[in-house]
Structure formats: structure tokens, C-alpha cells
Image: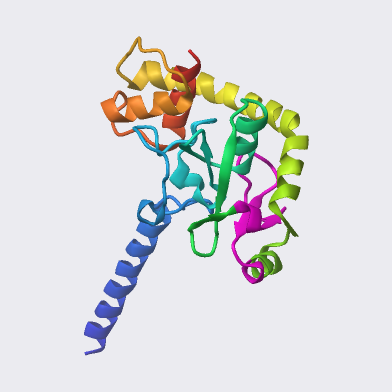
Amino acid sequence: MKKIILVGLSMLILGFSAFATEEMKKPKMQYQAVPMEKVTLVQKGESKKYCPVCGMTLPMFYKTSHAAKHVGEDKQYCSIHCLVEDKEVNGSELTDIKVVDNKSLKLVDAKKAFYVVGSSKPGTMTMVSKYAFEKESDAKAFASENGGELKNFDEVYAMVSKGMEKEKAMIAKRQKKMQMMGEKVYNKMCKKTDKKFTSVADAKSFVAKNKLCGEMQGKKLQAVGIYLGRR
């Protein structure tokens, strides 16, 4: 009887160990990422999943996502950095600005939102994180757990605008490396195309739709998109 019990316990332990090992092998979802079924995308067309400025995949950076209208067209960004860049650098006329509420994951009025700046959570397109909440109580609870200061939209916008050139230089350096990686990946793993692209988002959507690189996703797809978008 004892032998049977010991064998049963051993099998149970081995089964749990195997399960734990498999769970450890699964890639951890970064903090900003949200499952597709919980994401609200307002853009239209084949590139709707990608930020129109930097090309990053919106569901992967959904918790820092912003949206706005440009001459009646809906645009959605991975971060407030890209929103500010589109307005201040690219000259887009943005109205009806919204931001993802980190509590409900819904898009809410950015002008009425409470931002937590400088928490321990990772930033998107910046070293200083910025997460928004519809309710002040939720923002305070987040800051109490993760650090950071409460600010309003205008304060955060001014901060991003002031540091735009410094952040753009940092991003350009990072994207140059990604472009070099993308060229290598494209030449090694992808079907070739002579098509010219207007943006990284345009390139990524074309690659994904036509499966030029198979089922490629994540960092490799971003790298190939940067390479093709700037080629």
C-alpha cells in the first residue's frame, strides 16, 4: 500500500514539475501588452494594428495607447510620445484625444485622465513611464504600489514635447540597430519584394498579410518593418 502511495506521489510530483517547466518556457507578456480580445482599435485598414508613427504593434503596447482624430480620420498610437511627435513634428491636426484607462482598458478622454509618471513599470518609446487612469483613486492606488507622480494631460504633453529631441535621438539609435537586424532577417527568412512603403506600419501589414516571412511576429517583424519602411 505504501509503495502504491509513493508511486502515486512521485507521478504527481513529476507531472507538476513538467507543467511548471512548460509554464516557465512560455514567454511572459510585457506589462503594456493586452490580449487581442480586450483591445479597442479605432483605426481602419490593413495597418490598423500598428502605430502610424513608429509602426509598433498596438496590442503589445496597449496600456500606453492613445487615439485621436486627424481631419476626421481615426489614428491610434503606441504612446503619448508618438502622439506628440505626430502633432508637433509631423504637423497633424489632432482632436478628440483619448487614452487607455489602465483599469478598465477602455479609451477615455485624455484631458480628464489622471497620469502616473515615472512608475517602476516600463515606459513605451521613453525611459520614463506614463500610464493613465480615468479615476484619480485608481491612479493613486497604482502610484502607491508602483511609484510615480500624478499629472494631468497638459503637464505630460508639455514634458514629452520638451524632451522630444532627446527621446527621438535615443529612439533613432535604437531603430538603426533594429534596421540592421531587419535587413539580415529579411535576407535570410523572407520572400523578396520591390514594393515601396510609406511607413513602418505599411511595411509590417504588407509582410504579415502576404506572409513574406511566414508567421513572423514580435521583434523580428518590427525589425523587418523598419528595414523595409526605410529602404
Identify the residue at image location x=49%, y=64%. 104
**Lateral position of residue 72 relative to residue 88, left or right:** left
**Lateral position of residue 84 relative to residue 69, left or right:** right
Q: Residue 71: image x %, image y %?
A: 51, 33
* Viewer can see residue 42: yes
**Lateral position of residue 161 relative to residue 199, left or right:** right
Here the colouring is rainbow
Q: Residue 56: image x %, image y %?
A: 49, 36
Q: Which residues are magenta?
A: 110-138
Decide which of 150, 45 is in the foreground and name it: 45
For this orientation, the residue located farthest to the front is 71
For this orientation, the residue located farthest to the top is 194
Residue 78 to residue 224: above or below: below
Identify the residue at image location x=27%, y=72%. 11
Residue 143: name its quadrant.
bottom right
Residue 210 to residue 151: above or below: above
Residue 113: name its quadrant.
bottom right
Total labels drawn: 0
**Lateral position of residue 141 relative to residue 61, left or right:** right
Q: Is 223 inside the magenta-drawn segment? A: no
Q: Residue 191: image x %, image y %?
A: 29, 17
Q: Residue 222: image x %, image y %?
A: 46, 30
Q: Is 120 inside the magenta-drawn segment? A: yes
Give the quadrant of the N terminus.
Answer: bottom left
* Viewer can see residue 119: no
